[in-house]
């Protein structure tokens, strides 16, 4: 869950993340949360720079001298947005680096890319999605630029699913590559594709081949 608000040049973020069979109740290993404040240092039509920081709570692998987990760490916030007629880019560093871009953002045919890296164990930790998208309606259309269809490739994962076994470091991740097609109507997105080169990663060391297969996902958004 991400709460992202702003007032003038001030920006406020609240983050809560839990991927576990026992969220929160399984202990501090099963969730992460953070509160962050940022200030827009540069505010221009084509360039925005936000700098700030905050505090995160979770198990980040930081230990005290007696081997106990230290649950609080400071987190920096860097946000850079750069806009031109042919390229929109966004870089953000909160707990990890994220880069997004759209080539030809005002065209009905555009190329979108998203890249992030939460860890640095091997090449599969570079999570990305690159898609060629067609938007049937332009911004000038009375219906607005609200719908699109796309085809693309991605390397994704299900994150580090923490198993709530007290006193043990039990984690499970699922990684996969895929080719996909998607229909996006702003509040609803349906994606279908073919996943391959799947693997399960247990305790970050034990790997299991998950093979390949078809997948379907549905995402909905409710504004409030």
Image (cartoon, helix red, strand yellow):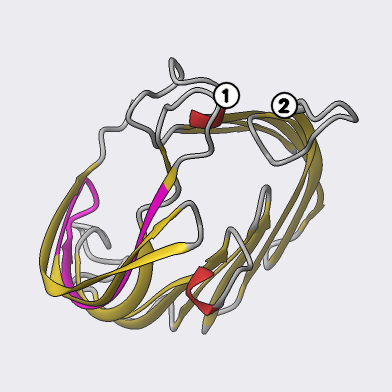
User: Which residue is at 50% across, 22% downward?
Assistant: 166
Quarter of the image with the C terminus is: top left
Q: In which image quadrant can residue 105 be found?
A: bottom left
User: Is 79 placed left or right of 170 in the picture?
Assistant: right
Residue 38: x and y in percent read 76, 38
Disc assigned to residue 216: none
Camera-side residue of 101 and 155: 155
Q: Is residue 132 at all visible to an observer of this figure?
A: no
Residue 71 is labelled as: 2
Q: Which residues are magenta?
A: 172-191
Q: Where's residue 101, x and y in %?
A: 51, 74
Closer to the camera in the image, 8 or 61: 61
Where residue 107 appears, as percent x and y from the top left, is: 35, 81
Left or right: residue 153 versus residue 81 is: left
At a point 26% along the width and 33% down the height, the residue shown is 222
The crowd level at tag 1 (other Cα within 10 Å; few <14, some 14-19, many 20+) is some
Are there few (<14), some (14-19), or many (20+) residues within 10 Å of tag 2?
some
Q: Can residue 223 be seen in this snapshot?
A: yes
Q: Residue furthest top?
A: 25
Q: Where in the figure is residue 150, as x and y percent of width and height?
A: 22, 76
Evaluate if marks 1 and 2 touch, with contact meaning CB atoms under 8 Å apart: yes
């Amino acid at each position: 869950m991400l709460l992202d608000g702003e007032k003038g040049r001030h920006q406020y973020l609240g983050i809560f993340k839990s991927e576990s069979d026992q969220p929160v109740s399984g202990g501090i290993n099963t969730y992460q949360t953070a509160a962050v404040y940022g200030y827009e240092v540069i505010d221009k039509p084509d360039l925005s720079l936000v700098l700030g920081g905050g505090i995160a709570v979770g198990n980040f692998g930081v230990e005290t001298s007696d081997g106990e987990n230290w649950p609080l760490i400071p987190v920096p916030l860097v946000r850079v947005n750069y806009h031109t007629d042919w390229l929109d880019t966004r870089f953000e560093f909160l707990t990890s680096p994220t880069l997004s871009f759209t080539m030809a953002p005002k065209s009905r045919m555009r190329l979108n890319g998203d890249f992030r890296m939460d860890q640095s164990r091997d090449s599969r930790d570079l999570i990305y999605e690159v898609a060629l998208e067609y938007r049937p309606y332009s911004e000038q259309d009375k219906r607005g630029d609200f719908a699109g269809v796309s085809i693309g490739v991605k390397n994704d994962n299900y994150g580090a699913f923490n198993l709530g076994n007290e006193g043990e470091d039990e984690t499970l991740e699922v990684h996969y590559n895929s080719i996909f097609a998607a229909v996006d109507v702003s509040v609803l997105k349906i994606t279908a594709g073919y996943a391959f080169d799947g693997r399960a990663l247990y305790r970050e060391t034990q790997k299991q081949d998950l093979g390949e297969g078809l997948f379907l996902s549905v995402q909905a958004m409710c504004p409030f």
